[in-house]
Image (tube, grey):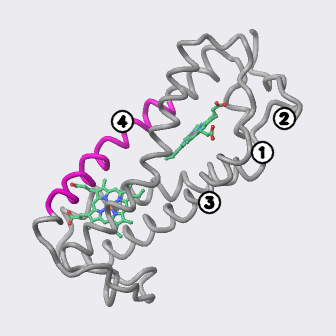
Amino acid sequence: MDQAVPLRGQDSRHPDGQYSTPAKVFHWVTVPLMVLALLSGLVIRFIAEEPKMAFYALHESTGLIILAVSAARLAWRLTSRAPVLPDHIPPRLRAAANTVHHVLYAALIIQPVLGFLTTNAYGFPLQGRTAFLGFIDLPKFMEAREGLAVPLHWAHSLIGWSLPFLLAAHISGAVYHHAIRRDGTLLRML
Ligand code: HEM
Ligand code: HEM
């Protein structure tokens, strides 16, 4: 193909081949939130004691907003179909995209839940200087349990450090479709 053109729809619900407006809004609202959650999470360990609490509040609030958006997004996704990919996308690429999308959806839910449980298990709920959005105290979820906090923190870190690689694969896929295959896949989400 000479230039990227929108994919023709292959199902009656998506005659233009595009994702629905709510699906696009959910997708693009998540992008800056995810950038903020990742950057703030990755730098917390290097921040000095004084502004650290503000970083926790920022990181944890952004993460909980991602959780709320993703829960609504997943509910939407499970009740309304995505546009069907056209036949000329090879099975290998479909399978790769599907796998990455499934893992991303799982991470969008599991990661903030792990973070929330971690802070609570350390006896460090979202209250006071680390309140939600800086001023909304959330109820304490459990008493401090260091033995639980350590593996939860470990799992949260593992997913946190894996996510940039997963997202790099996802974004490279989008760029590959758009700039190299020029098959219009990116336009489905714009
Ligand atoms: C999608 C949402 C989230 C992402 C992508 C994310 C990502 C990260 C990353 C990359 C780190 C750094 C890990 C490390 O350096 O070992 C981190 C640390 C952390 N996150 Fe999250 N996180 C999210 C949500 C949350 C939520 C909702 C909470 C709590 C309510 C939370 C609490 C924490 C805590 C307590 C740490 C440890 C910081 C430290 O080392 O002192 N995270 N997160
Ligand atoms: C610049 C950044 C990004 C670009 C260019 C991009 C591009 C795309 C495109 C083109 C699709 C549609 C694929 C298709 O037609 O089958 C898509 C789907 C998807 N993206 Fe992204 N994306 C970006 C960032 C993100 C981020 C940060 C996340 C979440 C953490 C994410 C999660 C997803 C998921 C879960 C889907 C599957 C949607 C569904 O089928 O319900 N994307 N993305």
Left or right of 70 in this view: 21 = right
Observer-nearest of 179 and 160? 160
Check if residue 166 falls in the magenta segment: yes
Q: Earlier in the sequence, mark 1 or mark 2?
A: 2
Separation of residues labelled 4 and 1 (CA atoms): 27 Å
Q: Which residues are magenta?
A: 150-171
Whichever of labels 2 and 4 marks the residue nearer the N terminus, that label is 2
For disc 2, the marked residue is 14
Q: Is residue 40 above or below residue 26?
A: below
Task: Estimate how packed mark 4 is, as few (under 14), some (14 to 19) or many (20 or more) residues with alpha carbons within 10 Å.
Answer: few
Query: Which mark, by number, is residue 72?
Result: 3
Query: In which quadrant of this rendering is ligand 2 seen?
Result: top right
Q: In the image shown, does 69 or 140 lie closer to the viewer? A: 140
Q: In the shown orientation, is residue 60 left or right of residue 22?
A: left
| Type of amino acid at the residue the image marks with label 3 | Ala
Tell me where residue 103 appears, x and y as whole percent: 44, 38
Q: Are marks 3 and 4 in contact (CB under 8 Å)?
A: no
Cα–Cα span, label 3 and label 1: 14 Å
Residue at label 1?
A: 20
Residue at 16% across / 65% down in the picture? 148
